[in-house]
Amino acid sequence: MLPQRSITGLLHYIISLAQQLSVYLPFKIFSMSLNRILAFSSSRVGNSGYLQTAVPVIKDFLGDKILNIAFIPFATVGNDYDEYGAMVKNGLQDLPHRIDTVTAINAKELLENADVILVGGGNTFKLLHDIYEYKLLDVIRDKVNSGAPYIGWSAGSNITGPTIGTTNDMPVIEPKSFNALGLFPFQINPHYTNVKPEGHNGETRDQRLEEFIRMNPGLSVVGLPEGTALRFDNGLLSFIGLKPGALFYLGASADEIIKEEISVNKDLSFLL
Ligand code: ASP
């Protein structure tokens, strides 16, 4: 029997069922999705305060109604979840919502009862490791597919893609798999910049992303410079922020990797 739902809830339910069935369907169903996602490049922009520039964007995304937010702090490497939660609550104090920090013990209950899922940055391998460890990948995905807005920054944005293969982090711990939430059908590279210090001989960011595409030719990558984000709402995916981003994908000839500038406010729905 269906639990009691609003019309929107019912719509989400039907679409999430359709998404689960989509493997059997000959057409793409993702673009019909009513998921709501805000994926920031970073928590800070330049010298701004922690989450300072995110606050107005989140306010516009979530509206004024008081909501229960479940904050996932697993990207922190020190396991100082409460401390991280307190920092996030402080950063978002101008928003009217209630924020609870997810731990191994309260995770399932908190996530099931939350209106919004918020995932912080840190080390992406650690974040995904803990999500697998506590068996939360499907819990989070189902929640978002049933209409709960998802907000993440940095590592929290990395896991919205199919894999975490375009993180900038070091693999300090081995997650069960590199496969992530797959809420978006493309990869994200947060803190994107291609600056090469004079005399430095390591790979540039663009070279690293090109390597990823060579090994994973079916996946495009959106490079999100600090101060930018992706907003997916009402079936529309927009690139928002202060400066252009970069889109990487395999060209028509298999050898050619294309890099294109993404202008501010560009509609990226064609990537879905
Ligand atoms: N370490 C970054 C963060 O969460 C993630 C990344 O750069 O891939 O802040």
Image (spheres, rainbow, N blue to C red):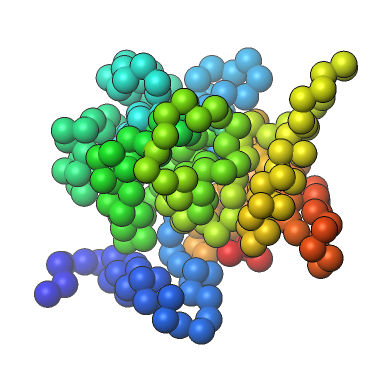
In this view, 194 is above or below 245: above
Quadrant location, ligand no. 1: top right
- Residue that sits furthest to the right in the current view: 198
- Quadrant of the rendered structure where residue 44 is? top right
In this view, 37 is above or below 253: above
Expressed as whole percent of the image width and height from the top left, the position of residue 170 reads 54, 27
- Quadrant of the rendered structure where residue 16 is? bottom left
- Report whether residue 3 is seen: yes
Expressed as whole percent of the image width and height from the top left, the position of residue 237 reads 59, 57
Quarter occupied by the C terminus: bottom right
Expressed as whole percent of the image width and height from the top left, the position of residue 147 reads 35, 58
- The residue closer to the viewer here, 46 or 169, is 169
In this view, 84 is above or below 35: above
- The residue closer to the viewer here, 19 or 149, is 19
Residue at x 82% of width, y 58% of height: 255
- Answer with left or right where residue 70 lies relative to residue 245: left
- Report whether residue 95 is seen: no
Residue at x 17% of width, y 35% of height: 106
Residue at x 59% of width, y 18% of height: 48
- Answer with left or right where residue 159 lies relative to residue 212: left
Expressed as whole percent of the image width and height from the top left, the position of residue 89 reads 35, 24
